[in-house]
Image: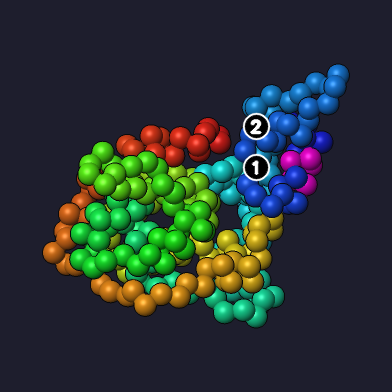
Amino acid sequence: MNQQIKNILEAALMVADEPLNIERMLSLFQEEGAELPDRQELKDALEALEEDYVERGIELKHVASGYRIQAKSSVAQWVNKLWTERPPRYTRALLETIAIIAYRQPITRGEIEAIRGVSVSTNVIKTLLEREWVKVAGHRDVPGRPAVYASTRQFLDYFNLKSISELPTLAELRDLDEIAGDLFSKVEGNKTEANGESAAEASESAEIETDAESTLDSGEADIQTENSRTEAVNNEDSIDNDSGNND
């Protein structure tokens, strides 16, 4: 393996403000007359970096948008002391909405409300769209043509996921608290990425204020079925075509 390639990739990943995919990494070597490394050489260098970090406080993480270097969750409680802002706070209404979208996408606002048993606050949908955790993936071919929502690569990146298939199966979870607990536990340490937004920025942007808090309707057992997750996984490519192949 070429040590220079490894050094270049490590430096690029350290200073980049977003995950880098293989294509973006290849572009770093595009010089006239220079011999470009192939994709396998880049992957070999990335594997070597991953091995280098095994006993260190940082790690190379492959998420939906590509690769990034970030602090390990095991050291997050110490690293987070660099910032004094309050930790992110999410309302139950927002957690319910994003969980339903993630597992049942593509889904309309009306369908989300039918599952929750209460109306969905406009502020919740607005917040999810502004954070780019969800997007309008199209419109349902019914009267009124309501928008259908789907999760995005940014949602997966934030929660350290490579694809929707990495979400825990609904059969493994008993209620929303478990879904949210497992999902949000993945983000510990992500606030202290070596190349991402600071905990202060994450905290400010994640501070959600809404009066729409409720519990999931226990009668809506259809959301807690393995079929829901299977549907979400099968629809992932058609929903998020802009994701591309990030290797």
Asked if residue 141 lies left or right of residue 12, the reply is left
* Residue depicted at 27% across the width and 66% down the height: 119
The amino acid at mark 2 is: Glu
- Furthest-front residue in view? 144
Task: Determine the image quadrant of residue 141.
Answer: top left
Asked if residue 22 lies left or right of residue 35, the reply is left
* Residue 9 lies in the magenta stretch: yes
Residue 24: horizontal and vertical position, in percent?
68, 35
Q: Is residue 199 above or below residue 54?
A: below
The amino acid at mark 1 is: Leu
Q: Are marks 1 and 2 in contact (CB under 8 Å)?
A: no
Q: Which mark is residue 37?
A: none
Residue 55: horizontal and vertical position, in percent?
65, 57
163 or 79: nearer the viewer: 163
Q: Is residue 185 above or below residue 31?
A: below
* Residue depicted at 52% across the width and 58% down the height: 131
Q: Which mark is residue 23?
A: 2
Residue 34: horizontal and vertical position, in percent?
84, 22
Asked if residue 192 lies left or right of residue 232, the reply is right
User: Which residue position holds label 1?
Assistant: 20
SS under mark 1: loop
* Residue depicted at 64% across the width and 64% down the height: 192
* Residue 235 lies in the magenta stretch: no
Residue 196: horizontal and vertical position, in percent?
66, 57
Highlighted range, magenta: 7-11
